[in-house]
């Protein structure tokens, strides 16, 4: 499949504005970044014309316990030994030409990707879509939790640090902080090129004595406009970034997990929360993180989850880690499918491509 033809189909199906390119905002689905050993691109042609396509990639997801990386004075948010790693797949760039819709082509491609992912022995497939009905018919269901909140509502005290310097752009020091972030995909050094390729993301960061202390990634062209979807580092330096953002762009929205907000903005739970997107400018909105399809461990080599690796959980805020009926450890399938455990799963903005 020619990359130009593939890009044309994506631009058409996702109604990308004139002069813009879907793959500029989602470069992970371009042939330049797709790892042939860990990904597949499926397509359907009609009279030598590409009419439908779907892509899938296998990744490693770090699942964090609520207690990992909660030292407010630490710039290292994550001790790599605190995370549970799962082999999962991400489905994206699903497109069908308008003249060939309602023929089951997209469903056929999605089922192909699911079969391929099952052969790779992944625990689950995750995706993001504004049209969930199609995927729910094929076994995907809403999963996880995310919070969207107007950043201005979360900020209290303004950080005044004369030694802080605010800068813009992306560099290797930011990427090293991102690699240590809490939750999300596990990133390797080669992923730095992928992150740098997101030309529509506005990166802000703070330095002190030339050391990067905190970072924030704002926007991504087609979607996530006005959203800070990548952020982390020293809480005080991060607050310095956020204060500058709300002065210049008062309607900026922060995207994060309940756990992230508990860490950086513990008072957020005192704000009245809503499930309605229309309330986003006046109160936090709690909604599903993504769509997910889980594979039964009975039909593949089980990827066991050791419940002892999730330490120091607080029942009041989260869950009990054992089956309440008999006290026995839960299987990996039960862990993944228990709705309460969705608190532990998180994808950052550039993970969710």
Image (spheres, grey):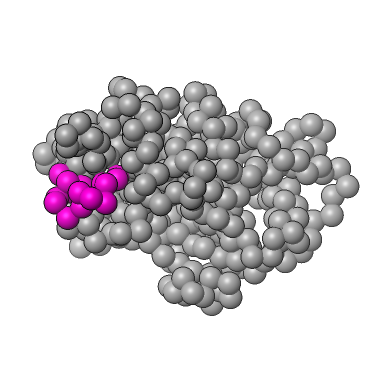
**Relative to 122, 144 lies left or right:** right
Q: Which residues are magenta?
A: 94-108
Q: Quadrant of residue 139?
A: bottom left
In the rendered image of this protein, does residue 259 appear above or below residue 81? Answer: below
Camera-nearest residue between 315 and 245 = 245
Residue 131 appears at what percent x and percent y? 30, 59
Residue 251 appears at what percent x and percent y? 64, 65
Residue 184 appears at what percent x and percent y? 45, 43
x 49%, y 62%: residue = 147
Does residue 86 show up magenta in the picture?
no
In the rendered image of this protein, does residue 274 appear above or below residue 122? Answer: below
**Relative to 17, 321 lies left or right:** left
Residue 28 in view (yes/no):
yes
Extreme residue in the front direction: 47
Extreme residue in the right direction: 162
x 81%, y 42%: residue = 165
x 43%, y 34%: residue = 28
In the rendered image of this protein, does residue 317 appear above or below residue 129? Answer: below
**Relative to 184, 43 lies left or right:** left
Q: Quadrant of residue 298?
A: top left
Number of marks in picture:
0
Q: Quadrant of residue 300?
A: top left
Q: Quadrant of the N terminus?
A: top left
Residue 68 in view (yes/no):
no
């Amino acid at each position: 499949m020619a990359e130009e033809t593939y890009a044309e189909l994506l631009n058409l199906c996702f109604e990308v504005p004139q002069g813009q390119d879907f793959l500029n905002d989602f470069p992970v689905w371009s042939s330049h970044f797709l790892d042939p050993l860990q990904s597949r691109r499926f397509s359907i042609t009609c009279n030598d014309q590409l009419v439908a396509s779907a892509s899938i990639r296998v990744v490693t997801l770090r699942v964090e316990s609520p207690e990992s990386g909660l030292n407010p004075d630490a710039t290292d948010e994550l001790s790599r030994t605190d995370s549970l790693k799962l082999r999962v797949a991400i489905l994206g760039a699903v497109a069908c030409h308008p003249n060939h819709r309602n023929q089951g082509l997209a469903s056929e491609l999605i089922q192909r990707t699911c079969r391929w992912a099952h052969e790779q022995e992944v625990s689950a497939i995750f995706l993001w879509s504004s049209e969930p009905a199609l995927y729910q018919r094929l076994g995907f269901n809403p999963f996880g939790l995310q919070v969207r909140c107007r950043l201005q509502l979360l900020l209290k005290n303004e950080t005044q640090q004369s030694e802080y310097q605010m800068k813009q752009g992306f560099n290797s020091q930011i990427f090293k902080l991102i690699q240590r972030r809490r939750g999300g995909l596990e990133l390797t050094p080669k992923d730095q090129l992928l992150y740098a390729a997101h030309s529509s993301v506005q990166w802000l960061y703070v330095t002190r004595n030339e050391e990067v202390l905190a970072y924030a990634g704002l926007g991504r062209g087609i979607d996530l406009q006005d959203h800070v979807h990548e952020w982390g580092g020293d809480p005080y330096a991060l607050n310095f970034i956020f204060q500058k953002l709300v002065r210049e762009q008062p309607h900026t929205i922060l995207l994060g997990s309940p756990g992230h907000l508990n860490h950086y903005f513990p008072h957020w739970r005192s704000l009245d929360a809503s499930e309605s997107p229309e309330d986003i400018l006046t109160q936090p909105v709690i909604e599903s993180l993504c769509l997910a399809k889980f594979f039964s461990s009975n039909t593949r080599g089980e990827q066991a989850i050791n419940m002892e690796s999730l330490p120091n959980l607080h029942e009041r805020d989260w869950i009990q880690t054992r089956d309440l009926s008999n006290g026995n450890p839960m299987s990996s399938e039960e862990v993944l499918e228990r709705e309460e455990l969705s608190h532990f799963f998180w994808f950052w903005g550039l993970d969710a491509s």
